[in-house]
Every structure is written in C-alpha cells, then in structure tokens.
Image: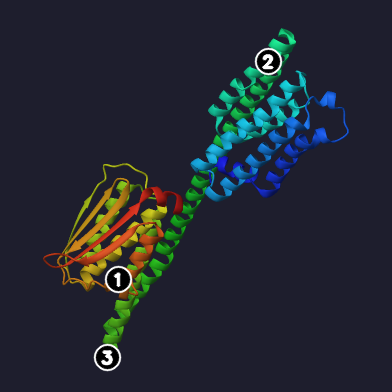
C-alpha cells in the first residue's frame, strides 16, 4: 500500500476522527463558557456555524474515505475541501478578534502540521496556505495598520515554511521507505535464489549420483540374471530409476531457472525440449529474446514447468511428431505450444487431474489465462498469457 494511503488510513480511523472533532468542538463551544471573551476574540454567533461546518465536513470526509478509499476522486475532493474549511475556520475568527496574535493560530498550526506529515496534495496545500491568509493580512492592514498586517503575514509565513519543510521531509521519508522495501525484496529474492541453487546442487550431486550408481548396479545384476522373469524385474526397476532420474533433472533444472536471465532461460528451454523429444519428435522453438524486460524468478520457474509439461504431453500423450513452441514478451508473457498429434477433447482441462490441471493452476496463480483446444487441421493448441505487471508483485 502507498505510504500516503497508509497515513490517511491512520488519520481517518474512528479514534483519530473523534479527536479531530473534539478539537473543533472545543473551539465551537468555548464562547459558551464563562471565560475572558475579550481575549478569545469571537462569540458563539461565529463559532457555532463555523465549528458545525468543520465537524460535519470532517465526519463526511472520514465516511468518504471508508466508503470509497484513498484513491477515489470523491475522497480527494472532500479532503481538499476539509483543508479549505479548516483554514477558513481559523482565519475568520482571527480577523473577527482583531488580535493578530490570537490563540486560534494554535489550531491553525496544528492543522498545518497534520497536512505536512502526510506529504500528499503538496502543490494544492502550498497554494492554499499561501493565498488564503492574504485577505487576513489585507484586513489587518486596513483596520489595525501595517504593523498588525505584517505580524499576521509573518505568522502565516512561518506556518507556510513549517508546512514546506515537513512536507519535503515526509516525501523524502516515503522515498526512503520505498527504497528500503525494494532493497528488502531484492535481498529476499537473492537469498531464496541462492538457497534454491544450493538445494539444486545437493540434489544433483547427492541424490542424482546415488540414482546413477543404482542404475549401473542394476545393469550389472541384470547381466547375471538367469531367467526371463528376473531380467524383466531388473528392466522394470531400471525403467523406474530412469524415470526418477529424469524427474530429478526436471526439479534441479527448475530450481536453477529462478536465477537465470531470460535469454539464458530460453537457451536452456530449447535444450530441455529437445531432450524431452528425443528421437520421437522434433521441437521447434521461437522465442522473443530481444526484449530485455525483467521476468521475476518465480515466474521463470513456472514458465519452465509449464513448457516442459506441455511439450511432454504433446509427445507422450498426443503422439505428436512435431511440436512448435512460441514465447513472446511485451506487457505480458505469451506461451503457445502447438502440435500435430491426435488432438484433445474440448473438456480435457476440466477432467484432468494431472498435467493440464497443474498448468492451469500455475497460470491462474500468476494472474494469467490458460486455454487448450483442438487445433484446426489436427493436433492441439495450448496457450497461456501471464501479465508481468501482476506477477512482479505477486510472485516475489
């Protein structure tokens, strides 16, 4: 969430809104109490309508925030109107009191500080805090003399300066926090990438080596088998080890995919697709590697899995002899896999509990769309679209 939105969410909490209404209520009801009304400088005839307007506007602005949110035009208009109303609520009593150092300036300062801490609407607030005090300066010059007008101008100038400093500081703080969050996200991604690379090395060097050793031991034992049944058992075990080794290779490769740049990933995908095809089929890969957009590591891993699953299905289930893979990058990542196999039923994705279902879940988890259907002229066409603007935030 944007830093300004977070701050406004705190400002518009029920307790904060109640506190602001209480402050305005004190200003509104002060003339009704037995105090030095001459020092106060204004009466209930002025404070009641202005205070009622201020409290009502504050409540309506808080309701607009809760109903429409920070980014809505309604809330922005109400928030700007609240600034104008509060400033008028301060300046009108100051003029009515005839006292250039009226205690109402305290409420004015409080409002300016509140606006400055948010950093939002900076240009609008600077304009309002500069222009609205000018009628008050002119009024004091005309009624009390140049000295009184200059004093009002000085106080208004100090509040304007305080707002400018606080607003600039708030903006710098927001930028610093945003940069910190970005660096934290990059550090987390780098740590995850390194850990995945370590796991991939351990799997490859440990489990992979052990499977290879078992494979060759079974091959040696098969040579000593004396019956066809024993040889068949050894062949079945060897086949299972081969499948396990191939799946382990997939896992290791996907773990490494998160740390690969997009061009490197494309090169590895081409190699992997040819390995999956073997002598059974031919895979042609067309990829847009000229676009250097950054693809998040988690997305690269899903892309690797989607492509492998789609090519494997086309060859082993569709019995395709030719598979065409197209990858392109613009505002979204487009994946298209077409084959000349025996085709697919239109409801295959809905009925699937394996490969196609897994692809659909992966694409949806990245905010994308997925479809698979028979291709005109025979075969199957699989398409997936992953919006990078969504996945960049969601996948890290």
Q: Nearer the viewer, mark 2 or mark 1?
A: 2
Q: Which mark is residue 139?
A: 2
**Point 29% across, 77% down: residue:** 239
x and y percentages locating residue 47 in the rendered image: 74, 32
Looking at this rendering, what residue extends furthest in the top direction? 146
Mark 3 and mark 2 lie on one chain; the one further toward the N terminus is 2
Q: Which of 288/394 is in front?
A: 394
Left/right of residue 345 with respect to residue 69 in the rendered view: left
Q: Which mark is residue 279?
A: none
Looking at this rendering, what residue extends furthest in the left direction? 377
Q: Which of 35/301 is in front?
A: 35
**Point 23% across, 71% down: residue:** 346
Residue 313, visible in the rendered structure: yes
Residue 273 lies, with reference to residue 265, above or below; the image says below
* Secondary structure found at label 2: helix
**Point 19% across, 61% down: residue:** 338
Instruction: Specify the quadrant of the image occupied by residue 379.
Output: bottom left
* Secondary structure found at label 1: helix
Q: Which mark is residue 349?
A: 1
x and y percentages locating residue 16 in the rendered image: 69, 44
Q: Determine crowd level at label 1: few under 14, some 14-19, many 20+ residues with C-alpha closer than 10 A.
A: many
State how far apart marks 1 and 3 are (Cα).
39 Å
Residue 150, visible in the rendered structure: no
Residue 218 lies, with reference to residue 96, above or below; the image says below
Mark 1 and mark 3 lie on one chain; the one further toward the N terminus is 3
Instruction: Specify the quadrant of the image occupied by residue 26.
Output: top right
Q: Which residue is mark 3?
A: 229
Residue 70 lies, with reference to residue 128, above or below; the image says below
Q: Which of 57/314 is in front?
A: 57
């Amino acid at each position: 969430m944007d830093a300004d939105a977070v701050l406004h969410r705190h400002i518009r909490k029920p307790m904060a809104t109640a506190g602001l209404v209480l402050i305005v209520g004190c200003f509104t009801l002060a003339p009704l109490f037995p105090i030095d009304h001459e020092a106060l400088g204004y009466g209930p005839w002025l404070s009641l309508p202005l205070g009622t307007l201020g409290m009502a506007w504050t409540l309506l602005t808080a309701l607009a925030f809760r109903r429409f949110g920070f980014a809505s035009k309604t809330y922005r208009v109400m928030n700007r109107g609240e600034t104008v109303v509060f400033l008028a609520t301060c300046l009108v009593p100051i003029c009515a009191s005839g006292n250039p150092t009226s205690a109402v300036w305290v409420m004015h300062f409080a409002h300016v500080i509140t606006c400055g801490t948010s950093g939002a609407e900076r240009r609008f607030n600077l304009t309002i805090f500069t222009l609205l005090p000018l009628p008050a300066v002119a009024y004091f010059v005309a009624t009390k003399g140049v000295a009184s007008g200059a004093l009002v101008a000085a106080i208004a100038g100090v509040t304007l300066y305080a707002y400018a400093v606080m607003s600039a500081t708030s903006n710098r703080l927001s930028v610093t926090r945003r940069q910190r969050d970005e660096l934290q996200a990059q550090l987390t991604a780098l740590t995850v990438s390194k850990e995945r690379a370590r796991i991939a090395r351990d799997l490859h060097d440990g489990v992979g080596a052990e499977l290879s050793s078992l494979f060759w031991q079974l091959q040696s034992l098969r040579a000593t088998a004396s019956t066809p049944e024993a040889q068949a058992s050894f062949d079945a075990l060897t086949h299972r080890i081969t499948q396990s080794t191939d799946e382990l290779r997939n896992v290791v490769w996907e773990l490494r995919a998160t740390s690969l740049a997009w061009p490197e990933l494309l090169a590895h995908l081409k190699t992997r697709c040819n390995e999956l095809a073997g002598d059974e089929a031919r895979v042609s890969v067309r990829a847009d590697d000229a676009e250097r957009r950054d693809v998040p590591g988690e997305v690269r891993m899903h892309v690797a899995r989607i492509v492998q699953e789609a090519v494997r299905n086309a060859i082993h289930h569709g019995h395709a002899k030719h598979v065409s893979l197209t990858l392109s990058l613009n505002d979204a990542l487009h994946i298209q896999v077409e084959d000349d196999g025996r085709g697919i039923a239109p409801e295959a994705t809905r009925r699937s509990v394996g490969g196609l279902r897994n692809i659909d879940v992966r694409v949806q988890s990245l905010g994308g769309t997925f479809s698979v259907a028979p291709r005109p002229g025979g075969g199957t066409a699989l398409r997936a679209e992953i919006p990078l603007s969504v996945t960049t935030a969601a996948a890290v």
